[in-house]
Image (cartoon, helix red, strand yellow):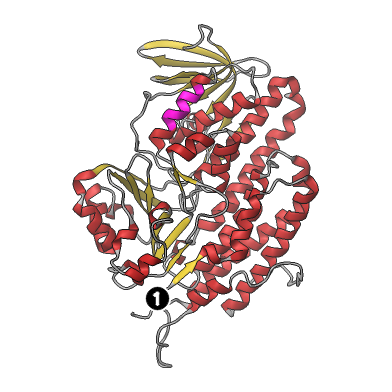
Amino acid sequence: MNSKDNQYDVVILGGGLAGMTCALQCRKESPQAKIAVLEKGTHPVTEATHKIGESSVEVGAHYYYKVLDLEDHLENDQIPKMGLRLFFDRGDNSKIEDRLEVGGTDFPPFPSYQFDRGRFENYLGERCLAANIDFIHSAKVKDVEIGKGRKPHHISCRIDGEEREFISRWIVDATGRASFLKRKFKLNQECSHNANSAWIRINKRVKVDEWSDSAEWGKAHGEMNPRWQSTNHLLGEGYWIWIIPLASGSTSIGLVAEDSFHPIDGYNTKEKLLDWIDKHQPVLGRDLREHEDLIQDFSALKRYSHESQQLYSKDRWAIVGDAGFFIDPFYSPGNDFIALANTFACDLIKRDLKGHGIMNFYRFFMYNKLFSVFFNNTGKVFKENYQLFGNHQVMPIKIVWDWMIYWSVTGQIFIHDRLCDKNMFMRHAGDLKRLNTLNHDMQAHFRRWHKEKGHWETEGVINTSALCLVMGTNRELLDDLTDKEFDERFEMNVKKMETLFWEIVDHSGMEIETTIKRVEHPDAVKGGFDAVFKVASSRPEMPSKETDFTGPVPV
């Protein structure tokens, strides 16, 4: 310990990614605060450590890069991410070059990163110590006594066999799925999303670029922007597989599946997982089997989604990271939710330590509500939608729609530093409600489209780097906006999403069940989905009139 005194302003339970970043943000916003992190494991950890959450998207990347000032580490010791890339099932999946591919040929304008979690957490530990934060590892928390009113909290724990007590004004629970405070206060809340996952790390660089000898397919990228730097996804009905490169040279590979399509007992051991991949993704399977001796670990998680009744209390405690909420790893939102939860928690702590605690009681309610809204709106993207993952016509359009909603709402609010601005939320309450309705109705429309019109297998490349409207929306996240400019941008984003909403409805050829009235926005950009529509709608030989077309056409 850096201090002999056991009294603190903030004690954080858990020294993983959420806990250490919360400590660093708290130090930045409350420079005089006395902070301790109690971590049950030992440090340093091994590189390619067995933790998921190795890929970031814009909000999480911005949080680490700008909010926590970790720019040098991300640029020099982690891997820049070339966006999201997806390959759809086609036939027996024996040829990667024959499959529908969605992904860019260039890095997106706004940067994001692939994380080697072991390397990242070791660096964060060093930063905590350098910031005069007491980082205490091998500390097993036994109990917490919550102080009421002005009374402090008491934390009892065991450190190297010795019983210790810590006294603190604030407690932050970052214990991950152990969920210490959530269990203590019985705050667990069931999540209807029923999906499972299993994953491995292998001590080699798995490169999708090397899975084909086709010169034409290889020319699509070349050496400057290789496909392997993307977060690569292999998609099929009810499942997807991630392939994430780690800076240590290892590769993280995981299967995620909705339980009704692919029950976890079919892949809940390393051998079962490899057999499953052999059957469904033979190209990846061959790569893994040839280097099976390099597999470093295996883990599986059943029904990983979970929720909490609250995250913040006027009794001066908070819950962050996986200790509170987790929805789904598709689109890599885990780091985003760390950023959101930490930012709300650190704002409450900062205001309280400045002596404004009583005046901020309404913020506890506000931040609990806002986090729940962000989480539930993200959940709409995943819940009941794994059935779409094998649909070549609907899923590419859904992917681009999901990106646009994310960059237009969550990305704009967090990256432009408006997350704790209650006046902004009041000004745009109507816009946010409208965007929420648009997204809710569009996700339902995607499901109806899939069920009523079926799908067929196709091929081609949807080069997301060439989608000017999409990449332009991503680039706008780099802007530094005044309040007036932010308000104008947000209002334009609503018009933009309404325009795209009706473009998708028109293309589907189906009526939509919605309360949103169709309004033309001459100043909003149209044609944003034309390139996606063209590739996703290409169709092999049409079925005969006698054919009851309800499923894929054999290719």
At 42% from the left and 46% from the top, the residue drawn is: 304
Residue 506: x %, y % from top left: 62, 77
Q: Taking 131 as reference, is 99 left or right?
A: left
Q: Taking 198 as reference, is 446 left or right?
A: right
Q: Give SS at disc 1.
A: loop
Residue placed under numbered mark 1 in the picture: 457
Above or below — where is 147 with respect to 351? above
At 41% from the left and 62% from the top, the residue drawn is: 221
Residue 155: x %, y % from top left: 51, 17
Q: Is residue 63 magenta?
A: no
Q: Taking 33 as reference, is 237 left or right?
A: left
* Kind of residue at disc 1: Glu
Residue farthest bottom in this picture: 545
> What secondary structure is the stretch in magenta mostly built from?
helix
At 44% from the left and 21% from the top, the residue drawn is: 141
Residue 161: x %, y % from top left: 35, 12
- The 10 Å Cα crowd at callout 1, few under 14, some 14 to 19, many 20 or more, is many
Asked whether 77 or 102 is in front, the reply is 77
Kindly indicate the quadrant of the structure image that contains residue 530: bottom right
The answer to whether one can see residue 311 in this image is: no
In magenta, the rendered stretch is: 121-128
